[in-house]
Image (tube, grey):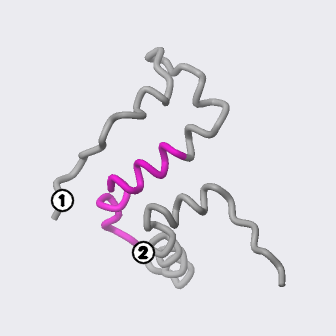
Amino acid sequence: MTKKVVSKSEKNMYRYGLQETLCGLYEQSRQGKIFKHLMKLIVSEENIVLAYRNICKNKGSFTAGVDGKIVRIFKNIRFKLLPKG
């Protein structure tokens, strides 16, 4: 039996419940579907936390941006971009 190698990014997608959603979107796009209403998914707390976790693992996350801040300052911020519902 061969063990499947899963990256940390993939594990995080499962942890935040986005793996099924993103795989579904990928399959639909391969069938030619055009998406018009993705903003709710993009700004969802799960997606933002997932992006943050993946970005923090990069060496560049320790490099300050033009504002002089690094990515890790957002560690304790709870993202509430859109009202639920």
- For the residue marked with disc 2, what is the amino acid? Ile
The structure residue drawn at horizontal position 60% and vertical position 56%, both measured from the top left corner, is 9
Secondary element under disc 2, as helix, strand or loop, is loop
Residue 16 image offset from top left, x and y in percent: 44, 61
Above or below residue 32? Residue 7 is: above
- For the residue marked with disc 1, what is the amino acid? Lys
Secondary element under disc 1, as helix, strand or loop, is loop
Above or below residue 85? Residue 76 is: above
| Image-based side of 36 in relation to 27, left or right | left
In the foreground, 10 or 15: 15
Provide the residue span drawn in magenta: 34-53
- Residue hosting label 2: 34
Q: Earlier in the sequence, mark 1 or mark 2?
A: 2
The structure residue drawn at horizontal position 75% and vertical position 73%, both measured from the top left corner, is 4
Q: Main secondary structure of the magenta part?
A: helix
In the foreground, 34 or 3: 3
The 10 Å Cα crowd at callout 1, few under 14, some 14 to 19, many 20 or more, is few
In the foreground, 4 or 33: 4
Q: Would residue 77 be counted in the magenta stretch?
A: no
The structure residue drawn at horizontal position 49% and vertical position 18%, both measured from the top left corner, is 66
- Residue 20 marker: none
Residue 69 image offset from top left, x and y in percent: 46, 19
Number of numbered discs overlaid on the protein picture: 2
Identity of the residue furthest to the right in this view: 1
Figure quadrant of the N terminus: bottom right
- Residue hosting label 1: 84
| Image-based side of 39 in relation to 10, left or right | left
The structure residue drawn at horizontal position 45% and vertical position 66%, both measured from the top left corner, is 18
**C-alpha gap between disc 1 and disc 2:** 25 Å
